[in-house]
Image (cartoon, rainbow, N blue to C red):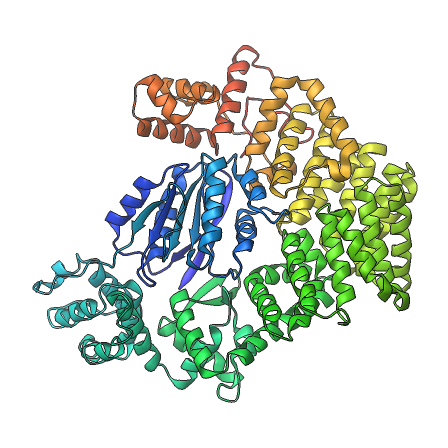
Amino acid sequence: MVTLITLSYGGVVMDVPRATTGYVGRRRESSAVRAALRPGCLVTLTGPGGVGKTRLATAVASQACREFADGVVFVDLTELGDGALLPDLVATRLGLHNRMGQPDAVVTALRERALLLVLDNCEHVVDAAAAFAAAVLAACPRVAILATSRQTLGAAGEQVLRVPPLAVPADDVAASPDALLRYDAVALLVQRACAVLPDFELTAENSAAVLDICRHLDGLPLAIELAAARLRSLSPHQIADRLTRRLPALAAAPRTAPERQRTLRATIDWSFALCSPAEQTLWLRASVFAGSFDLSAAERVCAGPDLPVDDVLDTVEGLIDKSVLIREDHGDIVRYRMLETLREHGRELLDASGDRARVRRLHRDWIDELTAAADANWAGNEQVGWITRLRREQANLRAALDWSISEPGEAGAALRIASRLDEYWMFFGHSVECRQWLERALAATPDDHPDRPRALAVCALHAVWHLDLDAAELLLADAEPAAADDELFGAFLTYVRALAAQIRTDTRAADLAGEAAAVFRAHGDVRRELHPLWIHGVSTGYRKGDVAEGRRSLRRMLDLCVSHGETRYRAMAQFGLAYLEVERGDVLVAEDLARQSLRSLVGIGEGSGTAYLLDALAWIADRKGEHERAAVLFGAAARVWAAIGSAPEIAVSGPHRAHKADTMAALGAERFARAHAEGRAMGADEVARFALGETEPPTDAWPGVLTRRQWEIAGLVAAGMSNRHIATRLVISQRTADTHVQNILNKLGLHNRAQIAVWFTETANAQSTADQKPQRWAAGKSATRPGVGGA
């Protein structure tokens, strides 16, 4: 069973997979990996499937969290069918929005971070992984990359560590049970045996059989786990006997494969043979899933005359018992995952059965139905739930699109699927990817396909979001003939042109948006009316100066969202109203609206809206005279803008520039730069609390909290010195310097070096002006003591 554990250091939240059964051995290998992992380095763990590369990487990642100020981010690449999407997947794991579809956007976001990036299972996208790693390490000196792959990446400077099988006693060793447990292979088998038989013990009676099992399986962890799962129904002696008789025959071919690879293949064949017919059927069919899947998906894709729907759950449980499927808990949902080695085995057998195309089509049809249901219910009370589900199924969505485009005669389904949910693709960081899917599908379908016009229009919408306005107009022109007999489709084209006009700051944006909104309203299409209302409200109220008319459009948008339970556009409406109020009306009303909007987005992790709102709250702080708070918020917004590959100048250039200039003038360049850097250094949760006014400074954060040496080191950190330079300056080891810096962070309740620098500077200043009360923590609140940028 696997759970996703959330670890947080330095403000970065990351999901690191960890087996709840614990980790056995590998002390020497773990030490070697940790010794090799240094900022600016690429370390690749290589070895055959099933040798334990991923388990070693996750163990090292969990141990290394405290060694990197911004933590560890774990990225599983098994779900990728196209290496070109690797940067987007990394961006998603980082909580970023890679709008440019290239490594550049992720590299830009990583440039300021000190973290460990784990790229797991690179072998099927090895060229893309190597190129991405090279790009990151060339520009991000504080990032280390740990990769796992069956082959080396071949990147410059790569350090390759081969992961061996677990230690097994030599053939001439006959040790006592206690002595055998010192060998990792035996310890793993016993641990897994206890998981299925809690009263299992390694005894003098069964130790020889256990030793035979480990030797037969060459110490391969996956093979040992598969064998241990059989102890529920067989004794160690029976398993050893079956392995003795069966493995040589199973491993006889192909002789060209390495011995351990043949052993693993033979063990998997043996495990498959011991499954019931229903379990074998589910194993084959479940191999079409990418990433993980839930029970309803298994019932839709895997059931058939030979596997009734009502039997799927019991069959899934059987495969979990046999360690073929791994259970994963995602909140209140249980999902299942198959290890890549076992998935490959299932796919090979599915191909050989001649049933592959049918099962892949069932998988695609399930995604087709899922996206159709999400699209139909998007603007409603279940929107957040659909967002969560679509994110979980992103890998399966990619697999369905890829198969549909690659399979002759099926590309029309890809047009249909990718044309849906344009808001999901746009707002949650997959806009570039959707455009790529649409372009591939359009190239694979005839010009007269009925789904082409809609696909062209949605592709144009994504092109506008990427500021590729000329390409967007060409796509709209191709789609235009279909609008002659379809007023709603014509309104959609007008809406896309309105968005393009707004981005160009063209005064026609308001009129075009108003025209589109009126058509959608006349047809009762609430969902499609919402974004044109926003464009009309903001363009009319700010660009044209008609605040009353702008408020009316945005208020209607907000009312529609509230009455229908729509979340994302509700936040946009509140932002739009705040936008008008901060510039033309009541700043306190603006602050309340902006905070309401931000609060609604916090739970769904939407990037572009968060950036707009942080920027707006910075304008508000400037209007209220809270200039240091404004600078921190500008810094926090800048980090998000950089992460999503966009900039505030695109849509809100006027207020952004004006308020930023006011803030800089009030603080002076040096103070502004310090506070701005503090905001950029904040983690997502910390930023949200600060922006919502929920953060208070730590109490009693005075120099006396630190030792004399720690105060000295804090000053050197504030001066911009690295731990290595500090160690040289003070004639101490770098490890001692590392420890001092970590102790400073712990004592002050801080998360990173940038916050130490800000704290030190302000605390030093406060010693001469103890009554200084910087207004940074919450609107209307002042710190009574020098503070830091986080709780």
Q: Is residue 656 above or below residue 479?
A: above
Q: Is residue 189 left or right of residue 72?
A: left
Residue 420 visible in image: no
Q: Is residue 75 above or below residue 693?
A: below
Residue 677 visible in image: yes
Q: Position of residue 460 (x, y in %)?
A: 76, 55
Give the residue at x 54% y 27%.
788
In terms of image quadrants, where is residue 352? bottom left
Give the residue at x 71% y 58%.
422
* Quadrant placement of the N terminus: bottom left
Tell which residue pokes out farthest to the top in this image.
768
| Nearer the observer, 355 or 91 | 355
Q: Is residue 225 above or below residue 710?
A: below
Q: Position of residue 317 (x, y in %)?
A: 42, 76
In terms of image quadrants, where is residue 670? top right
Count of all numbered marks drawn on residues in the image: 0
| Nearer the observer, 174 or 235 | 174
Q: Is residue 54 above or below residue 696?
A: below
Q: Position of residue 76 (x, y in %)?
A: 46, 56
Q: Is residue 784 left or right of residue 702?
A: right
Q: Position of residue 155 (x, y in %)?
A: 41, 45
| Nearer the observer, 720 or 671 | 720
